[in-house]
Amino acid sequence: MGLDLSVNLGKLKLQNPVLVASGTFGYAKEFERFFDLKQLGGIVTKTLTLKPRIGNPPQRVHETPSGMLNAIGLQNVGVEVFIKDKLPYLSRLGIPLIASVMGYSVDEFVKVVEALNDHKGIDGFELNLSCPNVEYSNAHEEPMDRPAKMFAHDESMILNVVNSVRQATDKTVIAKLGPDVSDVGKMALAAQKGGADAVSLINTFIAMSLDIKTQKPVLKNITGGLSGPCIRPIAVRMVWEVARAVKIPVIGMGGIMNANDVLEFMIAGAACVQVGTANFINPTACPQILSDLKSYMKQAKINTLSKVVGTVKGVK
Amino acid sequence: MSRPFRNTMKIKQQDLKVLSNKKIAPGHYVIELESEVLCKAAPGQFVQILTDHDQDPLLPRPFSFLDTGKKTLRILYQVVGKGTRLMSLKTPGSALRILGPLGNGFSMSWKRTPSNIVVIGGGVGIPPLYHLVKTFVEKPSLGIKKDQIHVFLGARTKDFLHCEQDLKKLGVHLNVATDDGSKGHQGVVTELADKFLSSTKQIEVMIYACGPTPMLKSSSVLAREHGVRCELSVEEPMPCGFGACLGCAVKIKDGKGYRFAMSCTEGPVFQADEILWD
């Protein structure tokens, strides 16, 4: 009997649970030289904004113990160029394509989604509610609905933005949650209430490194987002909390490096996962993970991988 | 204007066999690896080396080539952190995970062949320039005679004037400077290059520079003041090396404004006059 790795995510059916995380896979073409991209469960694009963004000045990245701090600043080509130059290639791959989107206001989120919604090849949207690197607050001349902090930090803002995007599209809507909150379960419930088909978590942690010689922050942006294996245990805990709180599928991520890490997230309750930082270190991390997942299934005599989801034992 | 050598080779990640790994100066080593494919890489290109598979250090680090043979390549490196310390412990017969070749190398063909080549290198920035000079000397078809090559090396102290003896053997003009005066001119190496550029009547000079940022900035200034062409190889923290992470940003001119170019895919060799220094 064949191995079934498929996953249902809202209206989307994925051939396997291994997606690539936003901002870690370029616009996919960067990876075509390394492996057949059709093997992936899906691709989440670099976050798209209404207008192009040139990104933050260097230094943008810094290695920390088993982790990486980044403040890229959402450098991206903007929706218009994306549709013209990047989407034709991505849609030809024939695997589910999730556009990661971000706006500085609810209205702008909706505009980005509307600009992309009718284009063939886009199967869903992941709302980047938690990019830590962009100035959200600019008190004067800002409309009232422009949040003074991240959307991801406030239940009512999550509810509002998810609900507004929900009205604008019939495609799969995923709310990507940030980790810098005291109760991530509540944030996930707000996304569910707003009509999200799934939640993905976690985005990077807001973090900081200092150079003790200069006494200045290492990153020009002062703070950055922390990713990599060092955040994995916290990510697993949050996925477990959220999976208990909501009925919609949970997409887990945070420092996944290999198949064992994928299984850990699935046991904690993730229906599928996103691989991020690992793509930088080993561009063939995803096909390796898929191959190892299949070996595991054969060895553990599991025909349907989704049966592993939420099987955590020894907890009430 | 000349354009740096563009990378058209297939990029692969593979485990390469370590043939030797020797200390050449305090804290500095030369490692020799076996790879037929990477030997075709051009001077100024680089590889990403992952020294550990246990997630600490997590990211690979970029290294340029010291030189390439038929089936072996050499890399000169300084022990700076945990990764390079682990690298220094690699013994012959062990393996090292390498991704490459990456990036674009120095120009080696021009519309107007330079009358003089000026090479300015500092510390661990010297190896890719030695690779370049060696290539010029070994390939007469490139149209540069060794008498036309003027090398300027700088270092903190004489121990770190890498490749000095090898460059002497190649028979090119060589000038050295050290911060502490332990060898050659006491001071920065760009002072020596400035003197040479002021004395030469040749105008078709091409400068190649690689080293610490202040040295690269001074080299750009020299090129502008003397009205000559100049290529710089920059070093930025670089998680992936192939254009995915957008980490290794360099501020460059873009029309009337600026943009951030990725040093891994658009560099690491840039025209000096495109870079905007802070």
Image (tube, rainbow, N blue to C red):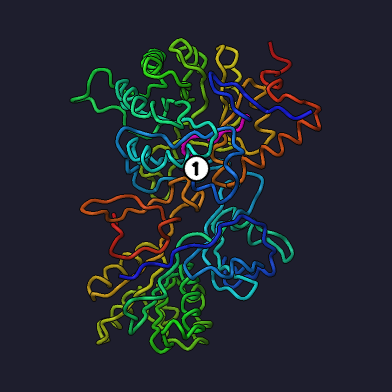
Residue A121 is covered by the magenta coloring: no
Name the residue type under label 1.
Answer: Ala
Image-based side of A288 in relation to B203, left or right:
right
The answer to whether residue A92 is above or below residue B192 is above
Res. A230 visible in picture: yes
Q: What residue is shown with label 1? A: A28
Determine the chain carrying the residue at label 1.
Answer: A
Q: Secondary structure at mark 1?
A: loop
Against B265, residue A306 (above or below) is above
* Viewer-proximal residue among A146 and A82: A82
Q: Is residue B180 visible?
A: no
Q: Position of residue A240 (x, y in %)?
A: 61, 19
x then y, percent, for residue B142? 44, 81
Classify the position of the C terminus of chain A by image quarter: top right
Q: Residue at x 40, y 52 (%)?
A: B262
Q: Which residues are magenta?
A: A16-26
Residue at x-position 33% and y-position 65%: B271
Q: Residue B237, percent across and down?
A: 46, 52
What is the residue that sits farthest to the left in this orientation?
A141
> Measured along the vertical axis of the image, is residue A304 above or below residue B256?
above
| Most common secondary structure along the magenta stretch | loop
Q: Residues within 10 Å of mark 1 (few under 14, many from 20)?
A: some
Q: Along the line of sight, which residue is nearer the eye, A300 or A253? A: A300
